[in-house]
Amino acid sequence: MKKIMGFWRCWGLVVGIMIGNGIFMLPAVLAPYGRLSLFGWLLAGVGTIFIALMFGLLAKRKPSLGGPYAYTRDAFGDLAGFLVGWGYWIGILAAVAAGSVAITGYLGFFIPEVVNSPLLSATVSLSLIWLITGINIAGVKTAITFQLISSLFKILPLFVIAAGGLWFGDFSISETENIQSEATLSNFAEMVMIIMWAYIGVEAVTLPSNDMQCPEKNIPRALIVGTLSVTFIYLLVSYAVMSLVSSSELAESTSPLADAASAILGPWGAALIAIGGLISIISSTNANIFIVGVMPQAMAQNTSFPLVFSKLNSDGVPATAILFSGVIASVLVAMNFSEGLIGAFKTLILLSTLATVLPYVASSAAELVMQRKDNRVDVKIKWWPLMMAALALVFSIFAIIGSGLAVIMQGTILLIAGLPFYFWSKRQSNG
């Protein structure tokens, strides 16, 4: 099939998947941290740049279908690769579920009954998952073109909020007496883990390498330019929202950027921002569903997952993998809505972030192992690739610590749950 992903479509995938429900929902989750959250955004942004540089090194070395799964498998073997691929897949499924919940939250700005009724909220979220799944089954070109267009449209409302906050805002209203606003190592670790949700997806552009033009060139460029673009936007918008909406009001909001717009533009402006938020979150959820079928496809091609997941439809899409993923994401939505919309969102993003940061650890270690192998064959290793991989590894471990023991235990259980699929697939391939 013709490779249709050049630099701008790669950039659109990076920006589209990172700028999603994170910046549109996290101001509410981070409200208890007050002004300290700005330092959290900056720290997470710097750490993500290290991770982007590390993935750029891996992609330049060997672009492979499956990204983190392929890199880990090459460095540490089939079982380690499977665990990373399985964990990453679970993380993206949780991201799809969280995205549908966030879309429902912003729909509540226009139809309050949607967020006031848990049953109606769950129904709307499930419907959204299957609507976007249908777009992706239509073909790679349809999905990725929609991704680029929606990525460009989503940036405009963010700059409107940023400009309004800088011009009309009052940063003093961001003060809070909450204990979480104290500058402790524990609070920073927890903040970084939460904020990393807004950066998750930086690695997504490494997955569909089969559909890319010059992946060894376009992937690193899209990673770095995309990450810098997103970090700049996040810092501006976070400061603006905190200057326009008090911490106590933010903590109760299900559409914080729309509330911020209401403070400067009134009801019509808030409605416009809410529409922008919906476009942004739909764009991010579309990007997640686009890549959610790639991981099981890559594992199935290497006999680490049932072979049925490697089959493509007439449009070149792993339809079985995408449909099965939609079912699992729907189950995750249904399981978590008993906690309410914001509670369900926070649980899903912590689980998704943990499951995605674990492959960052494995990929960083894989790059260090590959650099060591290069050294053994007398390939000259520069100091900066070694430092980038090491910093990415340290930052990823720090973020995992911030997820807390309960979420780490849940993630461990989910990883172990994948082992039967691995051993069954290996037995089938050997039989």
Image (spheres, rainbow, N blue to C red):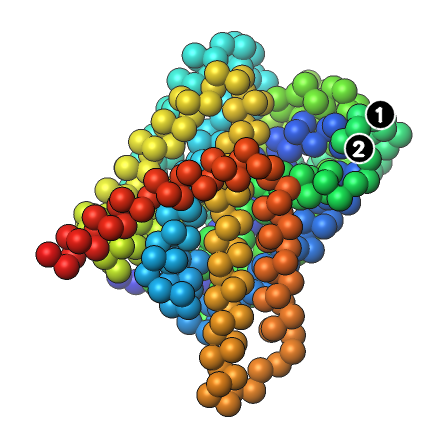
Q: Residue furthest left?
A: 431
Looking at the rendered structure, the number of numbered marks drawn on it comes to 2
**Residue 404 location, x and y as percent?**
60, 37
Report helix, strand or loop for mark 2: helix
Against 69, is 259 above or below?
above
Q: Amino acid at mark 2?
A: Ser
Tell me the quadrant of the picture where the N terminus can be found. bottom left
Q: At 77% from the left edge and 35% from the top edge, which residue is drawn?
A: 240
Q: Residue furthest bottom?
A: 378
Label at residue 199? none
Q: At 10% from the left edge and 56% from the top edge, which residue is drawn?
A: 431
One can see residue 224 in this view:
no
**Residue 251 location, x and y as percent?**
70, 22
**Residue 58 location, x and y as percent?**
49, 68
The residue to which callout 1 is attached is 177
Residue 371 is left or right of residue 89, and the answer is: right
Q: At 48% from the left edge and 74% from the top edge, which residue is drawn?
A: 370
Against 234, is 110 above or below?
above
Residue 59 is left or right of residue 24, and the answer is: left
The residue to which callout 2 is attached is 181
Against 213, is 43 above or below?
above
In the image, 50 versus 409, the foreground residue is 409
Report helix, strand or loop for mark 1: loop
In the image, 268 versus 154, the foreground residue is 154
> What is the spatial separation of the Cα atoms under label 1 and label 2, in whole angstroms?
7 Å
Q: Amino acid at mark 1?
A: Glu
Against 98, is 9 above or below?
below
Q: Are marks 1 and 2 in contact (CB under 8 Å)?
A: yes
Q: Residues within 10 Å of mark 1 (few under 14, many from 20)?
A: few
